[in-house]
Image (cartoon, rainbow, N blue to C red):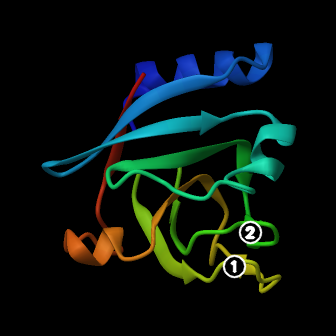
Amino acid sequence: MKHVSIFLILFMISVNVALAATVSIGDTIMSVEVMCSREDRSRGLQGRETLAENEGMLFVFEEPMKAHFWMKNTLIPLDIAFIDGKGKIVSIEAMEPETTDSHRSPIPVRYALETNQGWFADREICVGAIVSVDV
């Protein structure tokens, strides 16, 4: 992750402002909504019926943590990438709609990126890839 972007994201967390950003993974670019507050992170993509092909949601945690997600009230199948503080993807999991299965990061992470299911595989993005964010 770019250092300037991290500081801006941390500032947005402190003032609880919604934010849009662009995520780059190699040559692949995606538009994301950034979820900084605890309330926004807990709501996530619940209730939405669609997610555009190159759009996603980036969850930002104030401190590295073992993050966990579920799909209760989430209507679309998603993938989630857990990302460490240096921007490296440490895990990618598929998540099925309207389930309460827990999807946990294998180590403490600073970010999680949700996309349409299959988005990472379709672009041959895997564990170890580096994610950068432009706000």
- Give the quadrant of residue 70: bottom right
Q: Is residue 86 visible?
A: no
Gap in angstroms between the C-alphas marked 1 and 2: 5 Å
Amino acid type, residue under disc 1 in the picture: His
Earlier-in-chain disc, 1 versus 2:
2
Is there CB contact under 8 Å for labels 1 and 2?
A: yes
Element marked by disc 2: strand
In the displayed structure image, the side of residue 133 where residue 112 appears, left or right: right
Q: Is residue 113 above or below residue 101?
A: above
- Give the quadrant of residue 108: bottom right
x and y percentages locating residue 5 in the rendered image: 45, 23
Residue at the location (84% across, 41% down)? 38
Residue at the location (66% across, 22% down)? 18
Residue at the location (37% across, 30% down)? 2
Q: Is residue 70 visible?
A: yes
Q: Quadrant of the N terminus?
A: top left
Residue lying furthest left in this view? Answer: 27
Label 2 crowd bin: few (<14), some (14–19), many (20+), radius 10 Å:
some
Closer to us: 61 or 95: 95
- Give the quadrant of residue 49: bottom right
Residue indicated by mark 1: 103
x and y percentages locating residue 32 in the rendered image: 46, 39
Can you tell which mark lies on residue 14?
none
Amino acid type, residue under disc 2 in the picture: Phe
Q: Quadrant of the C terminus?
A: top left
In the displayed structure image, the side of residue 20 where residue 9 appears, left or right: right
Residue at the location (78% across, 39% down)? 40
Q: Is residue 41 above or below residue 99?
A: above
Element marked by disc 1: strand
Residue indicated by mark 2: 69
In the displayed structure image, the side of residue 73 where residue 58 appears, left or right: left
